[in-house]
Amino acid sequence: MIPRYETPEIKKIWTDENRFRRWLDVELAAVRAWNEAGAIPDEDCKNIIERAGFSVERIREIEEVTQHDVIAFVSSVAETIGESGRFVHLGLTSSDVIDTASSLLLGESLDVVVAEMKKLHKLLGGKAVEYKLASCPGRTHGVHAEPTTFGLKLLNHYAELGRDIERLNQTKKEIMVGKLSGAVGTYANCPPKIEARVCELLGLAVDPVSTQIIQRDRHARIVTDLAIAGGTLERLALEIRHLQRTEVLEAIEPFKKGQKGSSAMPHKKNPILCERVCGMSRLLRGFALPALEDIALWHERDISHSSVERVMWPDAFHLAHYMTKKMIQIMSGLAVDTDKMMKDLDITKGLLFSGRVLIALVENEGISREAAYAIAQDDAMRCWNEKIPLLELLKSDPRISKTTHSELESLFDLGYYLKHIDEVFARFPELGGAEASK
């Protein structure tokens, strides 16, 4: 990942130093398991555990000759140990080490991303409660539809992010497996009991059946679930981008003192953070396809997935973590104009209430739905085109004879549309106890 979009937490996990450290964790766990099984003498085991180390520079130097990073790693480790180093990598193949260590790295990365998403989730829940009763236009196709509340909109995003967190937690359970089943998964040189002990020492479950590798459906799920979560963040960012349009201005992302919006137009306050999140979501979901394509490898394994994963895994986590951090920044400093939301409810002069008018005409006038729709639509189109309030048009419409003016006026009550808001919020008991302030 380019430095501009790195996060220090993810960068730390995917450095060469840390990656090789996890490889060494696997190798040392295998040494301990072989020692317990009587295959490695106690003195040699002690020497290996005490002396084992590596040099990233030395690994790179050896790899220039061998063109094989695991061989280079094992050679570097053996050099730090001495004669006992001959027992390092006993009975293993490269992917035993790489894939088992990768599970540790991926699990660690998921923990970082999920922890950040939980912060955003909590923040969204609090904002949803705060604006639970803040009336605003609901929009479909970008056009005013019916009244809703800003809090209900945020509650929808809160629920969606909650599902992302649940998916990623489940995905972690699926990836936290190891394998030491050898070159084609037959345990020819390393029996299952060694694999089981190594996984126990590392806090992993055993992949019940593997080839030379852990199958990539597990890894594809990580990337696709991250891409789905990216879509969740993008949807929230896109909502704010619309609300910040000059014609709307119901909510605005943070704009710091000294910040500039344009080199040519000093007045500009652009939703650049939200736009950045939307753009990064495109990158993130772009990794979903190669992750899926990595599933189908030749027979017991080829290496076509390796180059993809070296780029895809760290970059996908950088993107997901960075986007989440930015959304926390955006939501923490979001400026919400509830007065403007109320004004925007009125700009279409009552059109948002046409659905209730339709129902009332069917019930009160004793006419078919088609006839009622024709009346409501005729008056609504005049409201659109002539800018005459819909209520005035309905009151003067000779086709409406059984619905009184007071009954027509009652159809334009915001409370009718908000009467079940509390009931929806009650489905999220973890948000209970907080009162709406807007």
Image: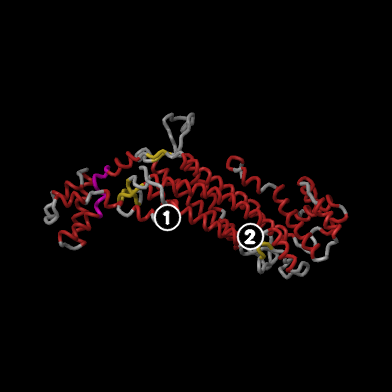
Q: Secondary structure at mark 1?
A: loop
Give, as a three-letter code, the residue at label 1.
Phe
Q: Residue at x 24, y 44 (%)?
A: 349
Hey, which residue is sitting farthest right in the picture?
83
The residue that appears at 66% across and 69% down in the rendered structure is: 209
Numbered circle sitting on residue 159? none
Q: Which residues are magenta?
A: 346-355
Spot occupied by residue 67 in the image (x, y as percentages of width and height): 77, 53
* Element at label 2: loop
Q: Which is nearer the eye, 57 or 102?
A: 102
Q: Is residue 352 magenta?
A: yes
Quadrant for residue 226, please give it: bottom right
Q: Earlier in the sequence, mark 1 or mark 2?
A: 2
Left or right: where does residue 186 sit relative to residue 258?
right
Above or below: residue 278 compared with residue 31:
above
Q: Which residue is mark 2?
A: 176
Task: Please name the residue that numbered disc 1 is placed on.
Answer: 428
Marks 1 and 2 sit apart, C-alpha to C-alpha, by 30 Å
Q: Nearer the viewer, residue 268 or 237?
A: 237
Point out the frontmost of discs 1 and 2.
1
Check the image and tell me how it is coloured: secondary structure
Q: Is residue 183 magenta?
A: no
Classify residue 157 as left or right of residue 398: right
Front-lying residue, 391 or 142: 391
- Dominant SS type (magenta): helix
Q: Residue at x 64, y 45 (%)?
A: 11
Instruction: Residue 111: give x, y in percent of width and height.
Output: 59, 52
Q: Quadrant of residue 46?
A: bottom right
Residue 372 rendering spot, x and y as whole percentages: 19, 58
